[in-house]
Image (cartoon, helix red, strand yellow):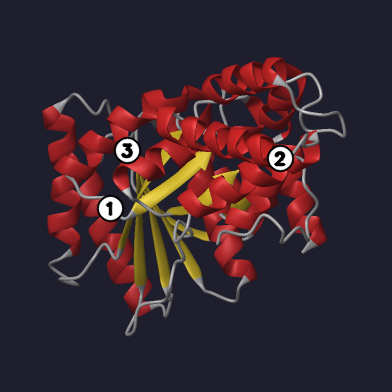
Amino acid sequence: MLSVFRKFKEGLTKTAQSIAASVGGVLGLRSVDASSIESLEESLYAADFGVETTEEILDEIKAAMRTSRSIAGNDAATIGAKVLKRVLKDAEGRLEPVEPGPTVICLIGVNGSGKTTTAAKLGFDLKQDGRKVLLAACDTFRAAAIDQIKAWADRLDLEVVAGQHGADAAAVAYDALAAAKARGFDTLIIDTAGRLHTKSNLMQELAKIRRVLQKQDESAPHYSLLVVDGSLGTNSLEQAKVFHREFGIDGLIVTKLDGTSKGGALVAIHREMKLPIFFLGLGEKAEDLQPFSVDNYVNAIFGLDATSRSASAS
């Protein structure tokens, strides 16, 4: 568990450092005062936690200050973590196997969100759990995407079904599901083309993939996960709303958190849409795609240790 927490801590360093630096020691042993509260407010907004969550954190810290002569920065961190854990209650998404399989997971999202690499990394993660995974290269609009997922599959010893550049993506998805059934794979991960959420014709292509899959399994895809670039902050919220309305999504994978100080955006998105968060992208390596853990995420953000339970939601 400690090594997993370390990945969260390292992957969320920029967000955590931004908060710690902005508040001038509020996460340390120094006493909290009005100035540090103001700095904390600024840093929480800058990290895209959203208005409601930021206000809840500040209100509870101020309440603690009123009932005690003084509180240290560590106490403020614990209070902030408690609020976040309460907000994120039930936010952990889990990919439960479907019986009879294969379990079909469809990754969707806009260009640049990291879907293709995430598809391969997700396959690697599930393979580590003992699942037999097949990848489907359904981003046929970009020749580079097909080459990219093949390269990742070769590196991670995963199998992939792919068509030619420009092929019908739905046809590739259909063939991949048929292959998964015939060859005994229990999980199929479908990488789709990136598309602007404002283009209705591109959204219709996703609907076609769903219809074609359902010719073989009326319940497929069993999981439709939106891959969002964490560095976009709460700008990803509008994407999530449109994809959810047009296609229906079961949850989120938030990528590129290691390169941004806006690591609070996933809290704002979950709070508004009540969608579970399945995985976080915390780095470039395959093992840096980690199942979302509320405890690890919150403790890393507020500089608490891996075993901290004093901040548990109550």
Distance between mark 1 and mark 3 Cα atoms: 9 Å
Residues at badges 1 and 2 in contact (C-beta under 8 Å)? no
Residue 154 percent location from the top left of the image: 61, 52
SS type, badge 2: helix
Checking the image for residue 77, the label placed there is 2
Residues at badges 2 and 3 in contact (C-beta under 8 Å)? no
Which sits in the foreground, 91 or 287? 91
Q: Hey, what amino acid is under mark 1?
A: Val
Asked if residue 5 lies left or right of residue 43, the reply is right
Q: Hey, what amino acid is under mark 2?
A: Ala
- Which residue ends up furthest to the right in the rendered image? 29
Depth-wise, is mark 1 or mark 2 nearer the camera?
Answer: 2
Q: Quadrant of residue 109?
A: top left
Residues at badges 1 and 3 in contact (C-beta under 8 Å)? yes
Asked if residue 241 lies left or right of residue 90, the reply is left
State whether residue 53 is above or below residue 215: above
Identified at 15% across, 71% down, the residue is: 218
Which sits in the foreground, 137 or 52? 52
Identified at 68% across, 35% down, the residue is: 65
- Residue under circle 1? 172
For disc 1, the neighbor class at 10 Å (few under 14, some 14 to 19, many from 20) is many
Mark toward the start of the polypeptide (2 vs 3): 2
Identified at 21% across, 50% down, the residue is: 248
Asked if residue 100 lies left or right of residue 92, the reply is left
